[in-house]
Image: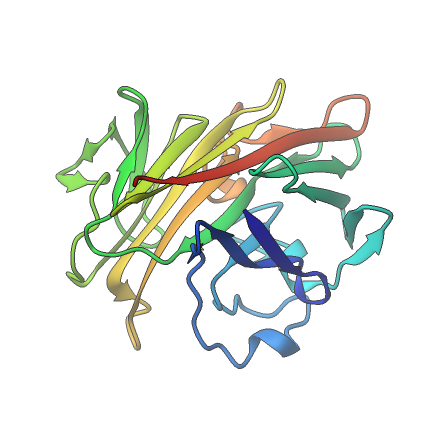
Amino acid sequence: MSVSTDPGHGGRWTSLTAGGREWLWHRDEPRRQGIVPGDAFADSGGIEECVPTVRGLPDHGDAWSRPWWREGDRDVVDCPDFRLTRRIDTDSGAAVADYTLTAEPGYRFVRAAHALLELSPSARLGIDGPAVTRLYPDEGARWVTGTWPLVDGVPLDRLGPDDGTAAGAVVLTPRISVQDGRDTLHLSVEAAGQPVSIALWRNLGGFPCDAPYRSVGVEPLLGRVFDRSEAADGDTAVVPASGHVTWRLTITAHRRP
C-alpha cells in the first residue's frame, strides 16, 4: 500500500493505492489550491481531515483549510482551539495513521477521515452484523434511526447507478469493508474511551442541486453525528483531563485472484 498527502493544503490524502489500484476519487476543483480558513468547502476528493465538525461551522472543520507542517515523522496543524498531529505508516502493508488532538479538557469535537472513493456502481459495503444506523435523508434533515443495511427504504450497502439522490448516514460500528469487483478495502477506527462510527456520503448525482455529480464517501468517524452543534451527550469525542485524545485509523486492501 502506498499513501501520498499534501501537507501544504490541509493535509489532504491525495493517493491511496494497493494492488495497482487507486482507491481515492478526485474531481477538478480550481478553488482548492487557494483556500483559506473560513472559505466554503472545496470538494476535490481524496481524504480530507475534517475536525472539529463535518457539517455546520466551520464548513467541514478547521483543519482542511490550513497548511500543515512536518515535525519529525509527524504532520502537524494548529487550529484556533486545538493542535492535531498525524503519523502515517505503511511499513506493515496497511496504512496506519495515528492521531493526537491536544486541547483544553472538556473540548468536544467530531472528526472524520472524509474518504471519497473511486467505486463502480456494483460496489458493495459490508458491516459485521446488524448495526444501529442514523440516516440523514436530506441535507440539513434530522436523522432517521434504523438497522443496517436497509434504513427508511434506502439500501445503504449498495450503490448502483446515478438516481439523483444524495443522503448521509452514520453507522454505529468501528469498521467497514468496501468490495468492488475483485478488490476489497477495509477501514477501521479505534479510540479508547471515545465514541466511534462510520459515516457514509451516498451522493448518486443528487448534490449539489445546481451542478450535481457522483461521489461516495466512506468515513471513519470519532463521534456519532455529522454536526457537532447538534450532538447530544455521548455523540462527540471529549478531551479528558490529560488534554489529549489519541486514535488510530487503519486501512487495508486485498485482491482476489
Closer to the camera in the image, 110 or 214: 214
Residue 245 rendering spot, x and y as whole percentages:
71, 29
**Image coloring type:** rainbow
Query: Residue pushed farthest front?
Result: 257
Q: Is residue 1 above or below residue 143?
A: below
Count up the numbered dots: 0
In terms of image quadrants, where is residue 205? Answer: bottom left
Relative side of 31 to 62, left or right: left
Residue 107 rendering spot, x and y as whole percentages:
70, 34
Residue 117 rendering spot, x and y as whole percentages:
39, 54
Relative side of 173 to 222, left or right: left
Quadrant including the C terminus: top left
Q: Residue at x 64, y 30 (%)?
A: 247
Relative side of 130 to 73, left or right: left
In terms of image quadrants, where is residue 64? Answer: bottom right
Q: Residue at x 29, y 71 (%)?
A: 212
Closer to the camera in the image, 29 or 253: 253
Closer to the camera in the image, 145 or 20: 20
* Res. 229 in view: yes
* Res. 60 in view: no
Q: Is residue 150 above or below residue 240?
A: below
Q: Is residue 42 above or below residue 56?
A: below
Q: Residue at x 31, y 28 (%)?
A: 127
Q: Residue at x 56, y 31 (%)?
A: 236
Query: Residue pushed farthest right?
Result: 72
Q: Is residue 181 above or below residue 130?
A: below
